[in-house]
Image (cartoon, rainbow, N blue to C red):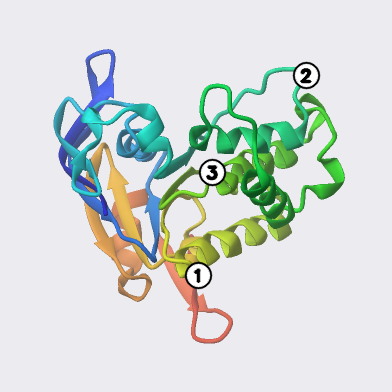
Amino acid sequence: MLSASRVFAGYGGLPVLREISLEIRPGEVLALLGPNGSGKSTLLSALCGVVRATEGEVRLGGRLISGMDRRSVSRQVAYVPQQFAFTQGFRVEEIVLMGRSCWLGPFERPGETDRRKVEEALAAMELERVREKPVTELSGGEAQRACLARALAQDTRFCLFDEPTASLDPRHALLVMERLAELAREGKGVAAALHDVNLAFRYASRLAFLKEGRLLGVFAPREVNEAVLETVFEVRWCFAPGPGLSRLAFPV
């Protein structure tokens, strides 16, 4: 289990998160939704120890994450931030291979397992044809998928994604969300900050809504109604039937 208990966190003494309690369970996709600046990115950063909680606790498998070294955390939690910068000179394949670094010693060379994980990640994100390409020559969507592939190659129990579909066209957005759902079916715990409510309805096991640094509630997709969305986003919503038994939500 990866959990936050009454967590406060922020930057430069300015609070962002206020008394957040939340858990990510193995075998689920947890969607984080809320307006810009609601604390979704900070919460993901706190859950992997990148941002330290000023109050409260973040625990990974029962251990305080603040007392764990980065290698130990990285072997259990993969994190893809919203913004990323690539160093010039690296090829896509090399970037994805970096996801295996937490499993290697200081001078250890990648082995067969590492290479297999990289191949699987490249295939999952449909990056085989650009594997030899310098990352600085990628499109925004390709760069996003390279970051996601690196996290897949890391092969951790928990995966945290900050707006994983933000730079993607519709087909690749669905590809990524299908892969996140597949990770959950494999028993991994997945959390993703999303702005697309309908993607959350379709793929998430639970939806956590944040506003002004506070957790307003956690719901199963079928429990979310117009009132919940209007409270969070301060705009009216309506629902319409979607494919099968699903629903689609629209701001109006």
Q: Is residue 141 above or below residue 125?
A: above
Q: Is 139 or 2 nearer to us in this picture?
A: 2
Would residue 60 appear left or right of 36 to someone viewing this image?
left
x 70%, y 55%: residue: 172
Would residue 94 appear left or right of 213 to someone viewing this image?
right
Q: Return the x and y of residue 218 as percentages of the image width and height.
A: 26, 60
Q: Secondary structure at mark 3?
A: helix
- Residue 175 visible here: yes
Check disc 1 and report the residue beneath it.
202
Sooner in the amino-acid sequence: mark 1 or mark 3: 3
Q: Secondary structure at mark 2?
A: loop
- Residue 234 visible here: no
Q: Is 214 or 163 nearer to us in this picture?
A: 163
Q: Which residue type does callout 1 highlight?
A: Arg
Q: Which residue type does callout 2 highlight?
A: Gly
x 60%, y 49%: residue: 165
Q: Return the x and y of residue 221 as percentages of the image width and height.
A: 37, 70
Check disc 2 and report the residue beneath it.
89
Sooner in the amino-acid sequence: mark 1 or mark 2: 2
Check disc 3 and report the residue beneath it.
154
The quadrant where residue 147 appears: top right
| Distance in Å between CA atoms under marks 1 and 3 | 26 Å
Mark 1 or 2, which is nearer the eye? 2
Q: Residue furthest bottom?
A: 244
Q: Return the x and y of residue 144 as percentages of the image width and height.
A: 65, 40
Q: Is 230 or 7 nearer to us in this picture?
A: 7
Sooner in the amino-acid sequence: mark 3 or mark 2: 2
Local crowd size for mark 1, using a 10 Å CA cut-off: few (<14), some (14–19), many (≥20): some
Q: Which residue type does callout 3 highlight?
A: Gln
